[in-house]
Amino acid sequence: MASIDRDPQPRDAEAHVEGDGTEQGEPAAAARNAAMPGTTANAGNEAQRAASATRRTAEMPRASEPSMRAEPAGEAANRHTPSQPVESQALSWETIFSTYVPAMLLALGVGMALPAIPILARSFDVGFGLASFVVTAFLIGGAVGTIPTGWLIDRFGRRPILISGPIITALVALLVARSTSFPELLVYRFLDGWAAQMWLLARLASISHRAGAGQRGRQVSWMYGMDNLGRLSGPLVGGFVAAAFGPRSPFIAYALLAGVSLIPTILLAPDVPRRVASGSQHAAGAASLTIRQIVLPRLPFFGVAFFSAVARGPIFADMLHLYAAFTYNLDARGIGFLATGASVLGLPISFLAGWMMDRFGRKATMVPGFIGVTIMMLLLAVTAVFHLSLAWYVTLFLAGVAAQSMTGGSIQTIGADVAPAEARGMFLGLWRFTGQVGQTTSPIVFAFLASTLGYGSSFVFIAAAAATTATLLITRVPETGKR
């Protein structure tokens, strides 16, 4: 695959919005020119050739701005051109209050609700197996909601989805607090997971649209860092709230936080172009990109998204804490200390990784990170096979967390880098769905291998996924963060 050159300006900064809502770039310009009445006898052939060029251009993974083309004077004069969006900066008041603060508030609400979820599920007199669906329903809702949300972003724009997500979150949290049956609770948790994806995907699409290559790594990584900070501190706050006001009160607090997160979103989040098919596009035979046209030209990128999610899935699902409990007889207190230590270690590294991606490039940061994960997981396999002491396990586990933190936010940054302007929402929906599938299935594979072949094979499985990710980055994926 050819190397992708990056333009530091926002990738849609030179895109315009027609009166009919069509986002203008090279493909749209070709479609428009194809639909114009010809001045020669071969006007029909010219239109066909222009439409063919449009389709070929749309299928290419575009990482730079559409080139400027000359337009007929009359059309250029009649076209309405809105003010150009200003490139967003990683460290600006707008980004802090429109991206980082809402991310932390929403994650804080999710974390606060976490201690109340098992208590609420148990109140409906269901067993552990059914109660676990309260957690998985949220994850399933997030996975199912990715692709439809991507379509909605392309159809209606980012701002309506950015606002709708927290509103739905707040309403669903209040409904959870008033739920009267277990099936009702599962439906609300499913919708909560979907709403969470709405805000996240719309924010990623906005960063992809407005942030230059030299800002995007920090914005995505720091957004995820604030999300981790909220999820880390939320359970502690939620526990105190539940003890003071009852087991359903954290969901009311969750709704309030979602409502507060709306304030900076409404005030600061700018609207950006949305795509509506115009008559000229239909005349030229140009249509929105199909899933095949989105995925196949970017297949190595999607491979990175999948295998990286497989590599981090067991760690994010706390399967390694489960391993420590069974192998080293760690109690809840010991696992709590281990989890807290991992979070405290990983959080600053993830912030540093965002700066490194913008300063040195995506691959220069990600490849060492995934190679580090590969090495640490292989060494953990050695500790499992030879039954080494707890000290060895803790040291290697924390080293693996540090290596994994070097890749924090990097996959979503690459997705924002290569998202095509003509189908950015759908692309990011497919991108997130790919990651969700890998992250959801890998803990199941990890557990299956542990029960059939032993714990060592489970760690080798994670190492193989990380090594595959590093190999794809080195051999098949070009650098997407060059200025």
Image (cartoon, rainbow, N blue to C red):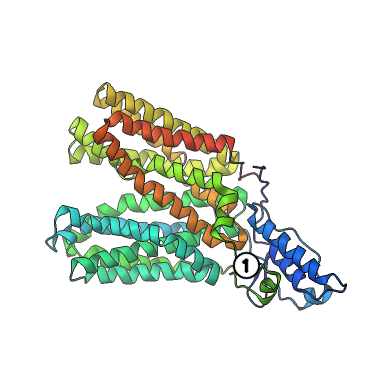
Residue 97 in sight in this render: no
Q: Residue 250 location, x and y as percent? A: 25, 63
Residue where numbered disc 1 is placed: 287
Observer-nearest of 290 and 77: 290
**What residue is shown at x 37% (from left), y 38% (from top)?**
345
Q: Quadrant of residue 141?
A: bottom left
Between 123 and 47, the one nearer to me in the picture: 47
Whole-percent x, y for residue 115 in the image: 22, 55
Quarter of the picture containing the N terminus is: top right
Q: Secondary structure at mark 1?
A: loop
* Drawn side of residue 82 relative to residue 333, left or right: right
**Label 1 sits on what residue type?**
Ala
Q: Is residue 202 above or below residue 297?
A: below
When the figure is inspected, residue 14 is found, relative to residue 396, above or below; the finding is: below
Q: Position of residue 20 (x, y in %)?
A: 64, 77
Q: Residue furthest left?
A: 125
Q: Residue 212: give x, y in percent of width and height.
A: 62, 53
**Position of residue 48 in the picture relative to residue 93 (left or right):** right
Question: Crowding at label 1, few (<14), some or many (≥20) Cα neighbours within 10 Å?
Answer: some
Q: Nearer the viewer, residue 287 or 366?
A: 287
Up/down of 320 relative to 164, above or below: above
Task: Tell me where residue 349 sits by quadrant.
Answer: top left
Q: Residue at x 19, y 65 (%)?
A: 182
Answer with left or right where residue 159 lies relative to residue 458.
right
Q: Nearer the viewer, residue 454 or 425?
A: 454
Q: Total marks drawn? A: 1
Direction right: furthest residue? 40
Q: Residue visible at 19% across and 57% down? A: 130
**Residue 118 visible in this rendered orientation of the protein:** yes
Looking at the image, which residue is at 32% across and 34% down? 458
